[in-house]
Image: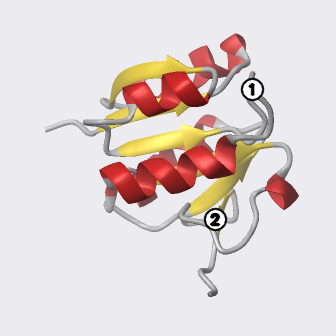
Amino acid sequence: MPKTALIIEDEIFVALDLERILTDAGYVVAGIAADSDQALAAAPGCEIAFVDINLRDGPTGPQIAERIARDYGVKVVFVTANPAQIGIPSEALGYVRKPFSDRAILAAAALASGIGEPADDEVIRISRTG
């Protein structure tokens, strides 16, 4: 059964590129959210999420990630040009830097789906400290 993904990204062309990569690989994309309200409404039923840091309503990505991981068990991977804004500790498994490659997104999806570990450094794991 295919995994269900949520894309939380306010740049539509970036979001559509993510959607294409995931759909072509067999993932079901439940939706694209550009802000906190849309993201929280779309999260139930999703298994993985690709989350940008800076969204239409500001740098809310880390708070969204924390909430959907805690409330819905969603596995989160950030897709961002600003990894320093993630904050530690984070509920996310890791992050992919923008601009990204198809390979990096698929490695992150596999990691979040529990199917494997990234074979290269395109997906940066976040170590939990606390």
Residue lying at 66% horizontally and 55% vertically, measured from the top left: 95
Query: Label 1, on which residue?
Result: 57
Q: Residue 4 sits in which quadrant?
A: top left
10 Å neighbourhood of mark 2: few (<14), some, or many (≥20)?
few
Query: Label 2, on which residue?
Result: 120
Q: Quadrant of the C terminus?
A: bottom right
Residue lying at 39% horizontally and 26% vertically, measured from the top left: 42
- Which of the labelled discs sits on residue 13, or is there none? none
Residue lying at 54% horizontally and 56% vertically, measured from the top left: 66
Q: How many labels does the image show?
A: 2
Residue 115, image x, y percentages = 31, 60
Q: Earlier in the sequence, mark 2 or mark 1?
A: 1
Task: Kindly identify the amino acid type of the residue bearing the numbered disc 1.
Answer: Asp
Q: Residue 9 sits in which quadrant?
A: top right
Residue lying at 35% horizontally and 23% vertically, measured from the top left: 30
Task: Kindly identify the amino acid type of the residue bearing the numbered disc 2.
Answer: Asp
Q: Which colour scheme is used?
A: secondary structure
Q: Along the line of sight, which residue is nearer the eye, 1 or 37?
A: 37
Residue 97, image x, y percentages = 77, 48
In the figure, 130 relative to 95: above or below?
Answer: below
